[in-house]
Amino acid sequence: MAITIKSAREIELMKESCRLLAIVHKELEEAIKPGMTTMDIDIMGDKLIRKLGCVPNFKNYQGYPASICTSVNNEVVHGIPNKQRVLKEGDIISLDAGLIYKGYHSDAARTHGVGKISAEAQKLIEVTRQSFFEGVKMAKAGGHLHDISNAIDAYVSKFGYGIVRDLIGHGIGTSLHEAPEIPNFAQKRKGPKLAAGMTLAVEPMINMGRADVEWLDDGWTVVTADGSLSAHYENTILITDGEPEILTLY
């Protein structure tokens, strides 16, 4: 599948989709507190997305039953919200969400602490976030896709964390998942050449322990194989003729 180059009009629509998603993430971050359930977060996120005149793109995507992926502690991604999962002081939670605005998708993820968290958990969150920015430094027209992958790996490896290899980033536009696939770990090949107008979802998923993951019986929730904490940070970005633009930041 070819990598799509967005027109000026498409880029404007992508930017608005991403701007609205940033609003959703900011409000969800401010709402997180001990005692709320992951279902509370999903209900709030769904209402926010629809209030903004958009549609949650995760809802019913390949059968996923919710609008916001809520992954707690050792859950890497795709945790399913429910009324029984109550957030506790010291937990960490990854929120992965996206929406559709006039046919164009946005996608972003954040990991937050619930109340006061351990120094080790905070460091994991910060390294995961920074690894995204290290990768995006290489997201320039004329460079190659795997420059991003290699930069993420080089940064994370210094801390001894496990970089999830079973799940990767992706292109995004009129579909939630488009070409190309974007690994978060070092690659021997250069990968496709980057060009202005590409929109990509770069999303390192980093484990405090080993890189290995497992899927739970629900068919969606991915957990660390060793039970260690995991963090996730993602933004939708635009390749330009200059510096890349991070579209889902708030």
Image (tube, rainbow, N blue to C red):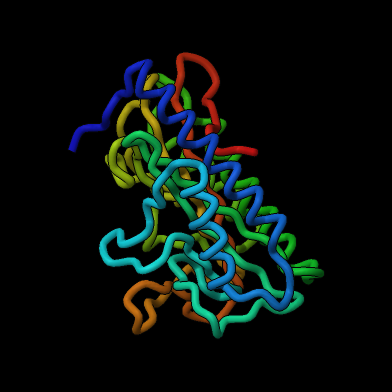
Image position of 186 (left or right of 234):
left
The residue depicted at 39 percent of the width and 19 percent of the height is: 196
Answer with the quarter of the image where residue 173 lies.
Answer: top left
Q: Position of residue 148 (x, y in %)?
A: 47, 38
The residue depicted at 47 percent of the width and 71 percent of the height is: 79
Q: Is residue 180 above or below residue 210?
A: above
Q: Position of residue 232 (x, y in %)?
A: 55, 57
The residue depicted at 56 percent of the width and 66 percent of the height is: 207
Taking the view exactly as shown, the residue that stands out farthest to the left is 1
Residue 126 shows in the view: yes
Q: Is residue 95 above or below residue 189?
A: below
Relative to the observer, which residue lies in front, 158 or 95? 95
Quarter the C terminus occupies: top right
Q: Position of residue 70 (x, y in %)?
A: 52, 67
Q: Is residue 128 above or below residue 218?
A: above
Answer with the quarter of the image where residue 212 lies.
Answer: bottom left
Q: Position of residue 39 (x, y in %)?
A: 53, 72
Q: Is residue 17 above or below residue 224?
A: above
The residue depicted at 60 percent of the width and 38 percent of the height is: 249
Residue 195 shows in the view: no
Image position of 101 (left or right of 71):
left
Relative to the observer, which residue lies in front, 184 or 234? 234
